[in-house]
Amino acid sequence: MLCLSGLDPSGGAGIQADIETLAALGCHCAPIITALTVQDSRNVSELVSVDPALIGRQMDAILSDMSVVAVKIGLLGSTAVIEQIASELAKHPDIPVILDPVLKASGGTKLANQQVIEAIRKHLLPLTFLITPNASEALRLCPMPNTSNEECAAYIHSKGTPHLLITGGDSPGDSADVVTNQLFNAGKPTQFYNWPRLADNFHGSGCTLAAAISGFIAKGKPVANAVAEAQQYTHSTLEAAQPLGKGQLIPIRVSPT
């Protein structure tokens, strides 16, 4: 697995979430840092993008050396980083790309401006196999205002991404007791997944879910199975989450021995 994600010094989200999740699932993570952040378990206060050319050289080195079976993308710090990643991925069209569009920190800080969102639409959606936005991220990716999940899915499918999982944890339409996630597969009926809503707030849940889906896809699972098993795994990490900082709970992705 090749993972391109930001560095979260709290260890709750970003590249550490990818590494821990994939290790728990029996996959090897080849990590490339896309951005450095100043953040804790409460919020992000600073983001610095890594040099795009360096990211490109790292991707070329790994993809030339290892038999990468899937790519997971998380935080993207700039349009230049997106363009560089897309340029490298275009050389390997047979490798499935799982994109977690990290547009806003769980603490509320926006991590992507309109130019970054437009670059994702133009350069990454045509190369993406499966994308995992929450409801608000799906709305930001869709250029039409006040659209439904179904309309967001239709737009993203039209850009070339065949599979879309919209998570409902932040959706005002969800009940107080249930979180509903929706899997849109182009040309197939929508699948609904209902999960009991946990009482706490979590730091890195979206990263964990996207990494788990990537891991199961890398292991050869069909999309629906990968998405279902990844949700089960992620829910278990949230049930085991710990208050390691002064803000949100951090998922425990690797069981203690």
Image (cartoon, rainbow, N blue to C red):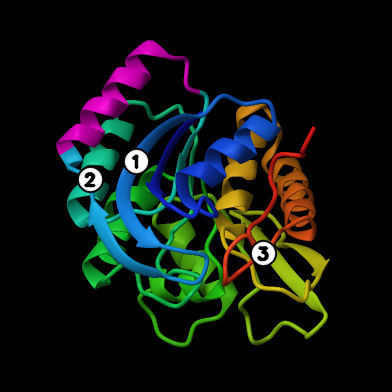
Span of residues in magenta: 53-68
Tag of residue 206: none
The local crowd at label 3, few if under 14, some if 14 to 19, many if 20 or more residues have their Cα within 10 Å, is: some
Q: Residue at x 51, y 54 (%)?
A: 13
The amino acid beneath tag 3 is: Pro
The local crowd at label 1, few if under 14, some if 14 to 19, many if 20 or more residues have their Cα within 10 Å, is: many
Helix, strand or loop under label 1: strand
Q: Is residue 64 above or below residue 155?
A: above
Q: Residue at x 70, y 62 (%)?
A: 190
The amino acid beneath tag 1 is: Ile
User: Viewer-nearest of labels 1 and 3?
Assistant: 3
In this rendering, would 244 be left or right of 161?
right
The local crowd at label 2, few if under 14, some if 14 to 19, many if 20 or more residues have their Cα within 10 Å, is: some
In this rendering, would 82 be left or right of 135?
left
**Measured Cα–Cα span from mark 1 to mark 2:** 7 Å
Q: Say if mark 1 contacts mark 2, CB within 8 Å.
A: yes
Q: Viewer-proximal residue, 197 or 163?
A: 197
In which quadrant of the rendered image does the C terminus lie? top right
Residue occupied by mark 3:
243
